[in-house]
Amino acid sequence: MKKGIYNIIVISMLWPFACNEAFEPQPANDPEAIFENLWQAFDQQYAVFEERVVNWGELYEIYRPQVNSATTEEELHEVISNLLAHLDDGHVSLTARNREVFFSNKIRELQIEDELFDLGVVIGNYLEEDYSSGTEDSYVYGKIKDANIAYIYFDFVGDNFSVLDDFLSRYDQAKGYIIDLRHNSGGDFTHAFEAIGRFTSEPLYIFQSQTKDGPGGDDFTRWHQWFLLPRGKLVDKPIAVLTDRYTISAGERAVMALDALPSVTLIGDTTNGAHGTVIGRELANGWFYSLTVQKVMLANGKSLEGIGLAPDILVKNELSALQKGEDQVLERAITEIN
Amino acid sequence: MKRFFLISLLLFFCLQADLLAQKKVENQLSLALGMSHLKRQDLIFSPFPHQDLSLMQIGINYQRNSRLIHSIDLQVGLFAPGYQTPYEYEEEGDVKTATNDLFIFMNLDYRIGKYLVKHEKFNLEAGAALITKVQALNYVYGRIGNFGYHSTIGLGGYVNGSYQLSDKQKLSMGLQLPLMSWLARSPFSINDDEYIENTTQNSGIGTFFAFLADGQLATWDKLQYLDFDFHYEYLLNQKWSLKGQYGFSFIHVQVPRPMTSVQNNFNITGTLKF
């Protein structure tokens, strides 16, 4: 109340352009202040230190001495990148002027096995010619050649999921479906939940989540439960869901929902293990970073943050086979449905 | 407290019975175009003030003078603020640009009052005001974008004073501020499960009302804001006048994290009297 009255008096008395009194102090633009600001922001808002088995305080003791007033921009970027690398979190990144984005997750940063998925191979060698696709391949769907199986791929999780109804209508005579979420970059999982409601006749409890709502280590909202709710005409056929290490964020949450269905088999590789909501922040030197502010716990009481969802059938493409036009993960899915 | 706010709102609208009064009525319709400088620091999104000078400001005002003075004011502004100038970065080999934020502000105010002093040279009017601010905020952090919102519906008062410099020239000054408000604002970590659930409405209006429903009653200790206005009016003829207008808006809120917003507006306004 006193600060409010003080603000009104200051604003009323001072020329309107000079209202700096009302603003909060800002972090300084020097290497040490920038490091402190970033470390503290994570300390107050990053939600999954425990799940990722990271002692953030210990890391401060290791990396803070490496920064002083003479630290160059190049050196500071390296120190912060090395600090963030300990989290190995697909949702944590550092963006700087004229540099490649740094990803805390080793798989994303080094693009490990990124080349083991090629949508072009799927379209060229496995789908019949009358396939459909969205803008910039936001979705691709069609019938598998020489098989009564329909395939759909989603590049991210958003309003592109609304085409699932069209897909199911067009291929309502298929004996089974393949939903490809490999290299799915995430988005808004509620779009996936809305669409996937076609596959269940009753509400299914999928996971619960809680979000940081204060600077203290235990400052979280109450757990909020998320259910997959039935919607529209029930589709009860075998479904193979394809995943890989680049299935991340809302893509993983979509996999969680699909995995709760009795008719679904997960095929491929373990997902990335980064589920919680991500936010962006900025530093005094103009760099941006992202961090996870939410915990997610599955219906079985387990958290797969930092672990990922393991497939029912582990299959990985070989580069040599893929280069010859063979998608072994997809072929296994076709075999399973047949 | 919530009940008191709702009753006050109801009484406010009940006063509109004056609109049916058949005393001498003067109407005026104004269109304002101009620019605005915004400086905003919102710790939910960033510890740094984001600034922009925007030329995209438009306003419409309808005023009816009879036994009471009624005024409806709609203002819309577009801002592209940032902390630093946009720069290029690379992601998986592609060069991308870290663009500025995008804010859309809408103010919808209703005032009802009467003259306290009505003199040949000097007028003073005062009354009650319903002050609504809806602010859609898209913060951009390079490859990450986060949507935020700040909305207030305030009940308070206003005062306007005007001084007739000559037959054709007039100076006016006004102030409005709320006594209590309904505040809906982004949560501590920008979004949480309630936020996500609200956006599943998947329609702009539905989502907006869902956000509003998750708000809280805010009194002066939590939320302070005011709007100040100063203008010079020149009467072109019996029907038309032109105004040069300066406006100042200030918002300060503490929950869930401090936010301070200062806006300086400069408008040219054309007014038709009928």
Image (tube, coloured by chain):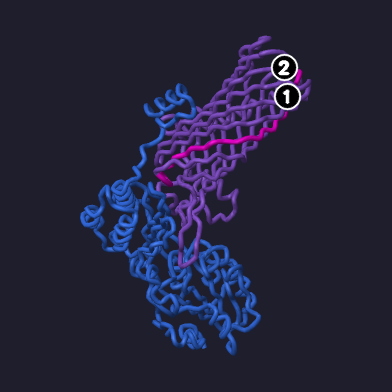
Chain colours: A blue, B purple
The structure residue drawn at horizontal position 59% and vertical position 90%, both measured from the top left corner, is A146
Image position, residue B224 (x, y; %): 46, 31
Query: In the rendered image, which residue does mark 2 sit on?
Result: B168
Image position, residue B254 (x, y; %): 40, 37
Query: In the rendered image, which residue does mark 1 sit on?
Result: B241
Quadrant assignment for the C terminus of chain B: top right
Quadrant of res A298: bottom left
The stretch drawn in magenta includes residue B45: yes
Q: Residue furthest top?
A: B120
| Drawn side of residue B215 relative to residue A27, left or right | right
Give the answer, above or below, for where B52 lies relative to B143. Answer: above
The answer to whether residue B49 of the structure is visible from this angle is: yes
- The answer for which chain carries disc 1 is B
**The residue under label 2 is which amino acid type?**
Lys
Disc 2 element? loop
First in sequence: mark 2 vs mark 1: 2
State whether discs 2 and 1 lie on one chain.
Answer: yes
Give the answer, above or below, for where A74 lies relative to B267. Answer: below
The answer to whether residue A208 of the structure is visible from this angle is: no
Disc 1 element? strand
Quadrant of res A151: bottom right
Circle 2 packing at 10 Å, graded few (<14), some (14-19), many (20+), is few
Give the answer, above or below, for where A89 lies relative to A176. Answer: above
| Drawn side of residue A209 relative to residue B174, left or right | left
Query: How many numbered discs, if any?
Result: 2
Magenta residues span B23-46
**The residue under label 1 is which amino acid type?**
Ser
